[in-house]
Image (spheres, rainbow, N blue to C red):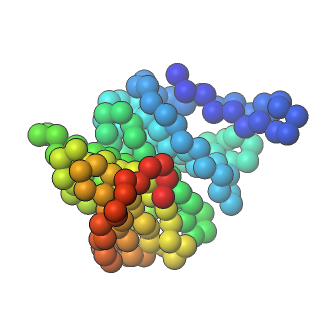
Amino acid sequence: QIVLERIIAASNARWRVDWPAESKGPAVPLATEVGVAIAGPGREANKVMVAMLSEDGETQWQREFSGAPNGQSFVDRSVGGSVLLGTTETDAVDNPSVMVRLLDETGEVEWRYALELPSGAALAGVASDGEGGAFVATTGIENWLVRIGAKGSLDWIKPLPIAAQGNV
């Protein structure tokens, strides 16, 4: 079970939220202008859940998407109340891909972009470009830095000389 607590300076829990996931895996919280965005394993295997919590810990919205068996996901704030979600996914024959989604302030998908990966590659992180687009880093046999534009289209892909680790 995953539990998210907001701790204030005196180390007292201000609120506590139980993540409704059946599977194990890390939940990734991110403070935003309007609350806390969190992504982690979904209720079922191969699902990733993302939610927006208010400053008081109340769930504003939550969505579930397909994702990797281990629930690997990254979130970043985007412009306004939007949230950027990146997940590693695999198809029926275990070919990996990265799915990047820009979710609006109500959790609806504004755009999504799928990036096919070579075998053994994985998502290393996502970051907002501050203009409604995203930077995506992958790691594995080949390491890439990818820029996705504000409309969800590919701007460019560049090889990285080193492996990316953590959020971009």
Residue 54 spot, x, y in % from top left: 68, 48
**Quadrant of the image occupied by residue 66:** top left
Q: Where is 135 relative to 24, above or below? A: below
Number of numbered markers:
0
Residue 48 spot, x, y in % from top left: 40, 40
Residue 77 spot, x, y in % from top left: 57, 60
Residue 12 spot, x, y in % from top left: 83, 30
Which residue is at a point 55% across and 27% down the rendered structure image?
2
Image-based side of 114 in relation to 133, left or right: left
In the orientation shown, which residue stands out farthest toward the front? 161
Q: Where is 52 relative to 27, above or below? A: below
Q: Where is 127 relative to 46, above or below? A: below
Q: Where is 13 relative to 75, above or below? A: above
The residue nearer to you, when weighing 62 against 5, is 5
Q: Is residue 62 visible?
A: no
Which residue is at a point 67% across and 41% down the rendered structure image?
58
Q: Is residue 157 visible?
A: yes
The residue nearer to you, when weighing 116 against 53, is 116
**Quadrant of the image occupied by residue 6:** top right
In the orientation shown, which residue stands out farthest toward the right? 10
Which residue is at a point 42% across and 45% down the rendered structure image?
73
Which residue is at a point 42% across and 76% down the rendered structure image?
150
Image-based side of 41 in relation to 156, left or right: right
